[in-house]
Amino acid sequence: MTSNAPGGGRILGSLRSADGAGVVRIEDRYDTDINDLWSALTDPGRLARWYGQVEGDLRPGGQFRLYVKDADSDATGRVEACEPPRRLLVTTRETDESYLRGKGVPPYDEALEVTLAADDDQTILVIEVRGMPLDAVAFYGAGWQIHAENLASCLAGRERGDTEARWDQLVPAYQALAADIR
């Protein structure tokens, strides 16, 4: 889903609830082939350029640690499914120490599913994140859109954008999307 945001720019996401928790779905098209995009999502060195530092066992069933600099957030996770180059499913949970130093919501179990589909010389990426508190789903929507935009910048060889400025632009649009979610 792509729509226009107040103040310009595209909205890549949609928001909903499932089982009383928030769900963020981000979809975008990238000017690269499916194998290159898969590498940007799963290679720790490339992942660190646009999202966060990951270390650990990245095979199915493996445990890992993740640090997302933009959010100053540490999490632990597990690889639930890995089907190169089409699907990745991980579960994560922010550490108690990270939560205590931050301003976010109490730690919760999050499921992150990524699917890729080749479309000629481009690739369609869908990120679905499930499990966040409903009262915070708009903020997670804005954050995940920023991550998707950072990925596009890195793939194109550009610097990442100004996260704070983009956050200020996106949050009102995602708050409007979240207004009717129950």
Image (cartoon, helix red, strand yellow):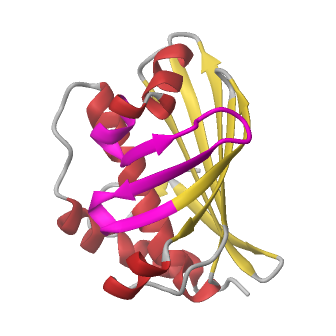
Q: Residue at x 56, y 77 (%)?
A: 137
- Above or below, comparing residue 58 to residue 170 in the picture: above
Q: Residue at x 32, y 84 (%)?
A: 101
Position in image of residue 150 (x %, y %): 31, 44
Highlighted magenta segment, given as a residue range: 46-75
- Which image quadrant for residue 68? bottom left
- On screen, residue 54 versus residue 21, left or right, reads left
Position in image of residue 166 (x %, y %): 25, 63
Q: Residue at x 65, y 50 (%)?
A: 78
> Looking at the image, which is closer to me, 151 or 121?
151
Answer whether residue 51 is magenta in the image. yes
Instruction: Name the outermost residue toward the top.
Output: 120
Position in image of residue 156 (x %, y %): 27, 25
One can see residue 2 in this view: no
- On screen, residue 56 versus residue 87, left or right, reads left
- Which image quadrant for residue 62? top right
- Above or below, comparing residue 136 to residue 70 in the picture: below
Position in image of residue 69 (x %, y %): 28, 59
One can see residue 49 in this view: yes
> Looking at the image, which is closer to me, 121 or 162?
162
- Image quarter where the C terminus lies is bottom right
- Which image quadrant for residue 25? bottom right
Q: Residue at x 43, y 17 (%)?
A: 32
Answer whether residue 174 is magenta in the image. no
- Above or below, comparing residue 39 to residue 152 in the picture: above
